[in-house]
Image (cartoon, rainbow, N blue to C red):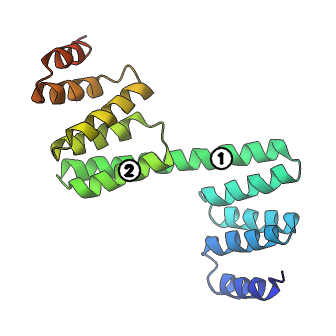
Amino acid sequence: MDNSGNMREFGIYRGENPGRVSLYNLEGTAHADQGELREAIKNYSKAIQQNPEDALAYYNRATIKADLGDFTGASEDFNKSVEIEREAAMKYLDQGIANYKKCRYQEAYDLFCHAIELNSSCCEAFYYRGRVRSDLGEYGDAISDFNEAIRLDPEYKPAYRNRGMIKANLGDYLGARNDISLTDD
């Protein structure tokens, strides 16, 4: 398949909009599809040079490095991609908390969901999404989120406390007492 016309188009757009890092990613992917792996790496590296926080470029470059047998380089790029995504998750979490405190529940919920998509091991994102769900009366979903927060960090006491309060509201007084007793110091 000849993508050379597409490559020229990417080049033209890239030249006109040098800040559009995604075009380097697209061009890198087109090169990879053509089996031009070293050219793909060059484009992903350009994307990273323009935006060192471009997790997708690190991920794409890591995949190609692995295909070329550079497992050390691939591992470094995969790790950097994950690190960037986790940092982004924390930004979404912080935005979500700010929206939650302003009682903007839908915005907060969406931000917490996005944080979870980026870092599914962030217990705080599950905890705060559980609080939103609790405030909206979605008790079963809230308990599920608190359960996940506890699974991720068994020492995270706010999740026990909030799960216990929901259990009490639902008439599960023994479960509520057990959860709340775990929050005592």
Q: Quadrant of residue 178?
A: top left
- Vertical relation: 112 (above or below) 183: below
Residue at the image point whose x is 23% and y is 40% from the top: 131
Residue 122 left/right relative to 135: right
Residue 127 at x, y = what percent?
Answer: 32, 36
Spatial separation of the CA atoms under disc 1 and disc 2: 22 Å
Q: Which residue is mark 1?
A: 80
Which label belongs to residue 91? none
Q: Position of residue 52 (x, y in %)?
A: 63, 58
Can you tell which of label 1 and label 2 is closer to the viewer? 2
Q: Residue 6, can we see it?
A: yes
Crowding at label 1, few (<14), some or many (≥20) Cα neighbours within 10 Å? some
Residue tagged by mark 2?
113
- Circle 2 sits in a helix, a strand or a loop, which is it? helix
Q: Nearer the viewer, residue 122 or 133?
A: 133
Is residue 152 rendered to the left or right of residue 65?
left
Q: Residue at 28% x, 40% y: name it.
A: 141
Q: At x 83% / y 80%, what residue is drawn?
A: 1
Residue 3 against residue 33 in the figure, above or below: below
Q: Amino acid at mark 1?
A: Lys
